[in-house]
Amino acid sequence: MAKEFTLHNRIGFKVTRLARIMESRLEKQLSDHGITRLQWCVLRGVGLEGVTTPSLLADYICIARPAVSRLLKTMEEQGLLERNGISDDKRFTEVALTELGQAKLKACHVLVREMNHHFAGKLDKDVYDLVMTAIDKLTEGEDVQLTRL
């Protein structure tokens, strides 16, 4: 069969393999702190980027709202965040990090930054910019609700 039709030369395989390599590495580092990748995304969104409602977090992380609700419940049970109703209306919830959540954010931020530098550092700036543009182009218009990231 022609080389361009082999599994290892397909964009889906290459992108998935890279994602799994990065995912595995990050999950290992975060597990040392007792959190998952999705929990890291919530900690970052709330603590560093001011994303404080479940709906906005779902959009921020690019996963479905029910998945975010389950994630927030687990994180609240672990003492990483608090959910508070706005104006006594249970339909509107605002999320805030606890002291433990802030500590996990601070500790894990260094790990995530190091991992990103590791992979980005393999590319020169022009290639990095090209890859980021290509990824944005490939995901453009793909409005799929994921249950996990």
Image (cartoon, rainbow, N blue to C red):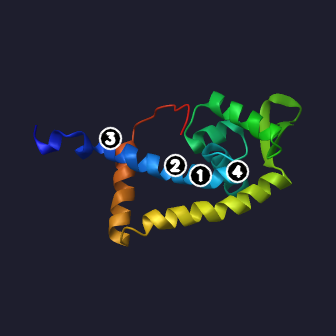
- Residue 24 shows which numbered tag? 2
| Disc 2 packing (10 Å; few <14; some 14–19; many ≥20) | few
Q: Residue at x 53, y 54 (%)?
A: 25
Measured as percent of width and height from the top left, residue 10 is found at 25, 42
Distance between mark 3 and mark 2 Cα atoms: 18 Å
The residue type indicated by label 1 comes to Lys
Label located before the other in sequence (3 or 4): 3
Q: Residue at x 33, y 69 (%)?
A: 126
Pointer 4 residue: 43
- 5 is higher (above) or lower (below) than 125: above
Label 1 sits on residue: 28
Kindly indicate whether the residue at mark 1 contacts the one at mark 4 (C-beta within 8 angstroms).
Answer: no
Mark 4 to mark 1 CA distance (whole Å): 17 Å
Name the amino acid, label 4: Leu
Circle 3 residue: 12
Q: CA distance from mark 1 to mark 2?
A: 6 Å
User: Percent x, y for residue 148?
Assistant: 55, 35
Which residue reaches farthest left?
2
Q: Foreground: 136 or 39? A: 39
Residues at circles 3 and 1 in contact by the CB criterion of under 8 Å: no
Answer few, some or many: residues within 10 Å of disc 3's Cα (few below 14, many 20 plus, some between 14 and 19): few
Amino acid type shown at disc 3: Gly
First of labels 4, 1 by sequence position: 1
Q: Nearer the viewer, mark 3 or mark 4?
A: 3
Q: Are marks 1 and 2 in contact (CB under 8 Å)?
A: yes
